[in-house]
Image (spheres, grey):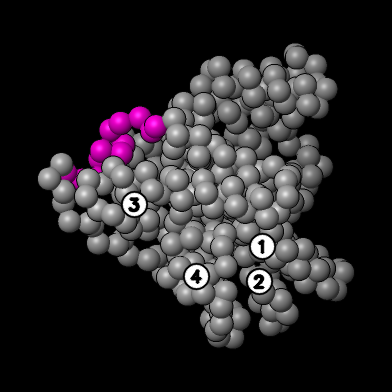
Amino acid sequence: MASYNYNQRGQPQKPVPAPRGARSPSSPHGNPMSLVMDRPMSSQVMAAAAAGMAASGQAMNDNRAKAVLKEAVDAVVNSFAKHSHGYGRVNVVEALQEFWQMKQDRGADLKNGALVVYESQPSATPPYVCYVSLPGGSCFGSFQHCPTKAEARRSAAKIALMNSVFNEHPSRMITDDFVDHAVHDAAGSFQGAPEQADNPATGIGAFRFMLEANKGRTMLEFQELMTVFQLLHWNGSLKAMRERNCSRQEVLAHYSHRALDDDMRSQMALDWIAREQEVEGVISRELEISEKELESARLAGRELRFFKEKRDILVLALSQIGPPESMA
């Protein structure tokens, strides 16, 4: 994912992808990550990962949620150490990269390769913050108070590894049954008629179209397409296209094949610059909201792509009209 770092003047610039870490010395049994990928995850590990997902996605006492999340993340990371045959500790940054490299080597459809990209948020003093972008588009961030930049990087890698592991569960794969259940649940939640699912012009039908177009992928790998449509909705682009009489099916067909790249970000930034010319201060206000959303989601261990893209687009827009007044 191409996102933006900031130089000393607060101007956005593209991050330089971090190089892959050195591999661990080979054990007598071969690559430890091969062993992890070759055998099913234990029920304890999957339960820990599921608990961590629940802690990041459900409302509970804040301290309790943080404790559950940390326990779940540590359990997943420790499972890799146990599978490494003799290594007491696991390099979680390396393990995350190896995990995705192994998936690509085994045929996973990763359009942009298996590189895991880290981005440190500029800061002269702790706590330090780091984001990690996974192949397929998901983004996670350091979820703990990190006194060093290295610790922030490890924290981001831990939460990303937990989600990557949980993503291997069969229930996360988009299959015919998954589509049917998801569409049925969506129709029930929004009180839609069952026949709407077969009509791409309806919201439920559009949801089915998106899922069916991504069968065989996991929900984590499906994230980039979801983020594109979340941003189009937030930016007002979907509303503008409806006003031009574009059907949902046409919009879906077009954007289902478009990557979330610098061109799309730049166009959305221009839209916000136009709004700023009509309502002074609108970008700064929206940026303040986006920064709070991003921080809250990061500390809760949630997936961050939508929140971070919003923040980056607004910072880009603000940099074109003056120095940023706020930055997370």
Q: Amino acid at mark 2?
A: Ala
Whole-percent x, y for residue 115 in the image: 36, 54
- Asked if marks 1 and 2 touch (Cβ < 8 Å), the reply is yes
Q: Which residue is mark 3?
A: 95
Percent of width and height locating residue 182 = 64, 24
Disc with the residue nearer the chain's start (3 vs 4): 3
Q: Is 185 located above or below residue 267 in the figure?
A: above
Estimate how packed mark 4 is, as few (under 14), some (14 to 19) or many (20 or more) residues with alpha carbons within 10 Å.
some
Element assignment for label 2? loop
Nearer-N-terminus badge (1/4): 4
Say whether residue 115 is magenta: no
Query: What's the magenta region?
Result: 30-42
For the residues bearing labels 1 and 4, Cβ distance under 8 angstroms: no
Q: Position of residue 307 (x, y in %)?
A: 65, 56
Q: Which residue is label 1 attached to?
A: 295
At numbered mark 1, what does the secondary structure look like: helix, strand or loop?
A: helix
Q: Which residue is mark 4?
A: 120
Rounded to the nearest angstrom, the CA distance separating label 2 from label 4 is 12 Å
Q: Looking at the picture, which amino acid does disc 3 mark? A: Ala
Q: Which residue is mark 2?
A: 328
The CA distance from mark 3 to mark 2 is 28 Å
